[in-house]
């Protein structure tokens, strides 16, 4: 591909008002990206399409280079075949790290941001064991299950890939900026959005399709009935990928979505062996149709609106109050050891113990044999 055609394709990738599938249709009709741009008003049928200038694309490439990243076009040899199989695969990705790793055989691990301590332990353990079996781990860099999955893969010396909703230079949550940098050193971080783009709610479903598209299977560790992870699950099914779910406590609303996936036919996962046994070894087949129907009941909600669970970590001068905010997120009706709570909560042991005592006095906490605790069911 010559430089003019490459720039034309990047301009179309950054066009507003038209998606990847429609752009591919326009290019196919016109014969090339350059010809599509020249005849864009007629080909677009009067639809308004905002197209960036070549100079804007060149400036973005220069900015990516300064950031240690580069464009990966869907026509490049290193563009992963698993992602290319999607009818709405991104026309271009900004990649920090090694783009060749995007084609590694991989599994996605996703789940709740406000994950229970047990879910985080399971996500980290699964990631560690799967990379030890030679797989890469894909996730979305969110707090909770995503973070645990990335950390588990890194701790085992394996490859992990993060797909982010905003631009590469706008880590979200901001607390994961260091984690994103670590992932880029030994794996890859990919973004469909331009540099400078903040992570907005409407971008998360698009990020989720990249997570599902890069992986051969998706493991949902913990998800409520209204969860962005269920979008990833639905997209995985539509793309013909294996869907797995970790069973959770029926008393914990954070597990109702993942438990529902099991009722609908997702493969139950307790160990990495469960994933390895069901994961296909051959090439990824393209989806059966552009509009493949999801399994009955798969939710299609957008990323939940309203108060973002990420904001549970707002700083406060009262460390006990902060510890309490973390505890009501970490704990669930499923018992967990106090030692595990202390390990997972970023506050001091004194603050955690004080917050546990407060919850106990309020009648919201069960203390169980073996120095374990659980939230009482509401």
Image: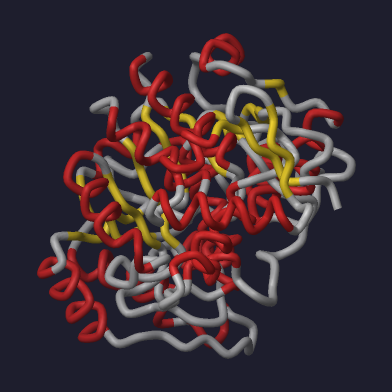
Classify 63 as above or below 21. Answer: below
Which residue shows up at 52% across the image and 40% down it? 85
Query: Percent from the top left, x then y, of residue 271?
Result: 56, 16
Q: Quadrant of residue 292?
A: top right
Let me know if residue 279 appears in the view.
no
**Residue lying furthest left in this view?**
66
Query: Percent from the top left, x then y, of residue 362?
Result: 75, 58
Which residue shows up at 50% across the image and 66% down it? 322
Classify 129 as above or below 138. Answer: above
Query: Percent from the top left, x then y, of residue 256?
Result: 80, 43
In this view, the residue in front, 214 or 49, is 214
In this view, the residue in front, 320 or 78, is 320
247 left or right of 371 in image: right
Classify 188 as above or below 267. Answer: below
Which residue shows up at 52% across the image and 63% down it? 20
Let me know if residue 370 appears in the view.
yes
**Count of numbered labels shown in the rendering:** 0
Q: Quadrant of the N terminus?
A: bottom left
Which residue shows up at 83% across the image and 35% down it? 250
Query: Percent from the top left, x then y, of residue 251?
Result: 82, 39
In this view, the residue in front, 83 or 22, is 83
In this view, the residue in front, 71 or 66, is 66
Q: Quadrant of residue 243?
A: top right
Coloring applied to the structure: secondary structure
225 left or right of 201 in image: right
281 left or right of 135 in image: right
């Amino acid at each position: 591909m010559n430089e003019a055609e490459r720039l034309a394709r990047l301009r179309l990738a950054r066009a507003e008002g038209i998606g990847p599938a429609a752009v591919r249709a326009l290019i196919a009709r016109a014969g090339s990206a350059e010809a599509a741009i020249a005849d864009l008003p007629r080909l677009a049928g009067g639809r308004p399409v905002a197209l960036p200038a070549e100079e804007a694309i060149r400036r973005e490439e220069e900015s990516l280079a300064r950031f240690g990243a580069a464009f990966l076009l869907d026509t490049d040899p290193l563009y992963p075949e698993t992602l290319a199989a999607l009818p709405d695969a991104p026309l271009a990705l900004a990649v920090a790290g090694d783009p060749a790793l995007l084609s590694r055989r991989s599994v996605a691990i996703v789940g709740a941001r406000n994950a229970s301590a047990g879910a985080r332990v399971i996500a980290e353990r699964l990631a560690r064991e799967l990379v030890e079996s030679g797989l890469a781990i894909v996730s979305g860099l969110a707090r909770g299950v995503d973070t645990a999955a990335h950390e588990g893969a890194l701790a085992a010396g394996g490859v992990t890939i993060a797909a982010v909703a905003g631009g590469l230079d706008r880590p979200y949550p901001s607390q994961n900026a260091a984690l994103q940098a670590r992932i880029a050193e030994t794996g890859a971080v990919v973004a469909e959005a331009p540099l400078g783009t903040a992570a907005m709610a409407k971008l998360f479903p698009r990020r989720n399709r990249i997570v599902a598209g890069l992986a051969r299977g998706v493991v949902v560790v913990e998800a409520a009935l209204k969860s962005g992870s269920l979008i990833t699950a639905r997209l995985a099914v539509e793309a013909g990928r294996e869907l797995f779910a970790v069973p959770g406590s029926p008393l914990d609303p954070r597990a109702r979505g993942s438990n529902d996936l099991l009722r609908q036919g997702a493969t139950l996962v307790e160990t990495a062996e469960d994933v390895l046994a069901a994961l296909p070894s051959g090439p990824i087949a393209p989806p059966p149709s552009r509009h493949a129907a999801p399994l009955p009941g798969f939710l299609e909600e957008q990323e939940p609106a309203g108060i973002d669970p990420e904001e549970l970590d707002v700083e406060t001068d009262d460390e006990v109050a902060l510890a309490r905010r973390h505890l009501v997120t970490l704990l669930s009706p499923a018992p967990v050891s106090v030692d595990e709570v202390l390990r997972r909560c970023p506050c001091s042991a004194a603050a955690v113990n004080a917050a546990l005592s407060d919850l106990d006095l309020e009648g919201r906490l069960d203390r169980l044999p073996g120095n374990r605790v659980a939230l009482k069911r509401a």
